[in-house]
């Protein structure tokens, strides 16, 4: 990359001190909370009470209003982990180390939620809780990537070292995600026949689709809220001996 | 300022938000030995690791003012771990240390072995040597490579009186030739074996 | 010159470390024996179909088990520190280190595994495919695994952690490798799998030196 651009970014990111981040997060948190409540509430209301019953799956399909946003968040969170990792590796900014780990933890949670809801959704159709379906398998592997990042971080005594190691792993994992996704899809179609369940049928009714979009937006706001909260608290805990933290 | 090799500028190191080193500044000069002394756990080793570029300081800079960009590649670092392979003989250990620096020469190895009086043990596996002898093998590496700077963590530990004198003598010679030494110990070096500056490390 | 130096040194060290070099092979045999005894109730035709896949998995497990030794000794005796400070081509040296590690601890398995498969009754073409896929797959696994090994080198309880780190990253190789072997067993085309495996190998040949040197620097910090 251009050297000038790099230094420009460095100047930009260096300004993000834990103190500034604390006030920034504190001002954002109420808004993230408000939006997540509104969107999730409205989306779930539409999805659970207004959307028509699916003619094939009955009422059971309504779990997609949790499953699909969780699956979306599992990828969104990883992108966030990746970007934060990249910034913290290149420019060594403390705030982004903390943000990357907070994103990873919340991302792991959403991935787990997507796995559980996917399995519950599949039960009536498959007859078992688990089938090696392409998307579920990809999601499971993603969950393991999250786990390895979190475990690696906690294995180090020194949390800055732990964060740096976890960041490297997150970047390597990010390069791998498309490869894993491709290989799993390929494995699934070649050897198991087409997937039993189509998650994204293009002909989904708009009454069913809109609630999905609302809940997805709501979940995203919730993710932002959770990451900001946990990063803010971690930073405050670590900086407790500095003057700005004492004054709070 | 001609004789300055490295300037250590206001180094601080935090580990888990605990201060290990605070605002440390000094210079490493040509033909001078610098002894960093302090209590156990005062951060001497961390400071050495910062100087050779293994640990990144939380704040502050290490400035290479020697005019030689490859200064750190021409540095010998001997840490707590001696860097000798147990399954190689003394001689092999030395010759593999050489290949990293190229310019192979059996002559130098022979001379180093003689200086430290280890010729008799040259074909012994290093793992069968005593602690002090292993230390001597690692110190011998300083003699066979052309380095601008020696960075040695506790050179005197595990050594007997005779070997300490040998080390002091070789250091004297090396400093005369324009080299520099930075070392740690837990006390001030009182006797002027070589021109030493003492720098106390507090934690 | 340098390449040869590192490799001869590693071979010299391995030759002096006694029977260590045979351990992976013995461990490989142990897995095979356990597996065959526990599945002896399965029909023989199905067993034969499972055989190459099982051997592939055993090799993968051995690869994971071997990973720890890539940097372990150098870390313990302090040569890794010195190398990171002094070496001006760290990336190249890491690659050579991985290569010599692969030659010493994985290549024996790559050679022994098809032989065992033959002994157990696998046909020649599938055995050959097994050999080729292992020949491409195990170096890729060594490359990926070295990143995990480098990240965990300074941790004391790192064995299971290495497996967790490596599991998601090994999935594509496992999929392509077993698929190629399986296709070969059923006399189907498997050139796509081999191409994809080669592709993976080259990707990690590019990524590993960078990621590994960065990881080692963090570990030794």
Image: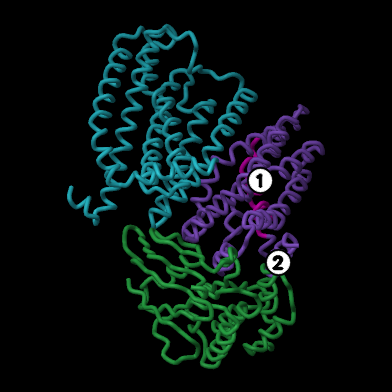
Q: Is residue A64 left or right of residue B31?
A: left
The residue indicated by pointer 1 is C205
SS under mark 2: helix
Q: Nearer the viewer, residue C37 or B8?
A: B8
Location of the N terminus of chain A (image quadrant): top right
Q: To which chain does the residue with label 2 belong?
A: C
Q: How far apart in space, not on screen, are marks 1 and 2 (Cα)?
A: 23 Å
Task: Give the prevailing secondary structure in the magenta stretch.
Answer: helix
Q: Is residue B38 above or below residue C67?
A: below
Please state the extent of the stretch shown in magenta in the rendering. Answer: C23-42
The residue sitting at the right extreme is C124
Which one is in front in this view, the residue at disc 1 or the one at disc 2? 1
On the image, the x and y values in percent for residue A247 come to 17, 50
The residue indicated by pointer 2 is C9
Q: Is residue C24 visible?
A: no
- The chain letter corresponding to cyan is A
> Which residue is pictured at 40% across the width and 45% down the height?
A11
In the rendered structure, which disc, 1 or 2, sits on the residue that comes first in sequence? 2
What is the display colour for chain C?
Answer: purple
Q: Is residue A70 left or right of residue C99?
A: left
SS under mark 1: helix
Does the magenta portion include C40? Answer: yes
Q: Nearer the viewer, residue A99 or B171?
A: B171
Q: Is residue C192 left or right of residue A70?
A: right
- The chain letter corresponding to green is B
């Amino acid at each position: 990359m251009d050297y000038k651009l790099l230094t420009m970014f460095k100047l930009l990111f260096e300004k993000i001190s834990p103190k500034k981040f604390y006030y920034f997060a504190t001002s954002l948190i109420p808004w993230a909370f408000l939006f997540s409540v509104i969107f999730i509430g409205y989306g779930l209301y539409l999805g659970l009470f207004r959307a028509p019953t699916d003619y094939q799956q009955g009422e059971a399909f309504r779990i997609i209003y949790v499953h699909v946003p969780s699956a979306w968040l599992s990828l969104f969170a990883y992108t966030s982990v990746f970007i934060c990792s990249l910034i913290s590796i290149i420019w060594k900014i403390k705030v982004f180390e903390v943000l990357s780990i907070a994103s990873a933890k919340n991302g792991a949670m959403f991935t787990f939620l997507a796995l559980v809801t996917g399995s519950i959704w599949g039960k009536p159709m498959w007859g078992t809780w688990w089938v090696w379906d392409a998307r579920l398998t990809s999601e499971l592997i993603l969950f393991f990537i999250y786990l390895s990042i979190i475990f690696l971080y906690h294995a180090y005594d020194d949390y800055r070292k732990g964060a740096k190691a976890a960041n490297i792993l997150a970047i390597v994992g990010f390069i791998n995600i498309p490869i894993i996704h491709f290989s799993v899809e390929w494995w699934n179609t070649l050897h198991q026949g087409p997937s039993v369940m189509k998650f994204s049928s293009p002909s989904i009714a708009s009454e069913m689709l809109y609630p999905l979009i609302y809940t997805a937006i709501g979940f995203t706001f919730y993710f932002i809220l959770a990451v900001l909260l946990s990063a803010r608290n971690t930073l405050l805990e670590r900086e407790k001996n500095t003057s700005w933290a004492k004054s709070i | 300022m001609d004789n300055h090799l490295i300037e250590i500028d206001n180094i601080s190191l935090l580990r888990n938000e605990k201060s290990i080193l605070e605002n440390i500044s000094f210079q490493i000069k040509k033909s001078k030995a610098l002894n960093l002394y302090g209590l156990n756990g005062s951060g001497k080793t961390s400071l050495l690791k910062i100087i050779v570029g293994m640990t990144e300081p939380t704040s502050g800079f290490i400035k290479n003012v020697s005019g030689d960009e490859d200064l750190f590649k021409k540095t010998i670092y001997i840490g707590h771990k001696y860097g000798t392979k147990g399954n190689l003989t003394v001689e092999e250990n030395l010759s593999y240390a050489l290949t990293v620096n190229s310019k192979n020469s059996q002559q130098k190895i022979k001379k180093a072995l003689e200086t430290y009086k280890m010729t008799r043990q040259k074909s012994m596996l290093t793992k069968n040597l005593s602690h002090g002898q292993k230390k001597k093998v690692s110190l011998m590496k300083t003699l066979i490579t052309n380095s601008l700077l020696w960075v040695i963590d506790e050179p005197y530990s595990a050594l007997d009186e005779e070997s300490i004198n040998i080390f002091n003598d070789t250091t004297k010679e090396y400093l005369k030739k324009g080299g520099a030494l930075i070392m740690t110990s837990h006390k001030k070096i009182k006797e002027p074996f070589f021109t030493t500056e003492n720098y106390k490390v507090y934690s | 010159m340098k390449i040869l130096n590192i490799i001869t040194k590693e071979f010299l060290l391995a030759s002096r470390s006694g029977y260590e070099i045979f351990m992976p092979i013995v461990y490989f045999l142990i897995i095979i024996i356990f597996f065959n005894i526990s599945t002896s109730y399965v029909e023989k035709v199905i067993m034969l179909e499972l055989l190459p896949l099982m051997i592939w998995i055993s090799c993968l497990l051995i690869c994971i088990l071997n990973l720890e030794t890539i940097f372990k000794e150098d870390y313990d005796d302090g040569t890794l520190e010195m190398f990171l400070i002094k070496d001006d081509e760290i990336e190249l040296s890491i690659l050579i280190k991985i290569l010599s590690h692969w030659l010493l601890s994985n290549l024996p398995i790559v050679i022994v595994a098809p032989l065992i498969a033959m002994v157990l009754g696998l046909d020649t073409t599938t055995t050959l495919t097994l050999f080729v896929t292992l020949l491409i797959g195990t170096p890729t696994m060594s490359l990926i695994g070295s990143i995990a090994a480098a990240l965990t080198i300074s941790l004391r309880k790192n064995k299971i952690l290495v497996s967790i780190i490596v599991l998601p990253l090994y999935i594509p190789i496992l999929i392509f490798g077993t698929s190629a072997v399986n296709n070969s067993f059923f006399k189907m085309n498997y050139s796509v799998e081999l191409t994809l495996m080669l592709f993976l190998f080259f990707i990690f040949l590019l990524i590993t030196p960078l990621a590994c040197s960065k990881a080692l620097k963090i570990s030794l910090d």
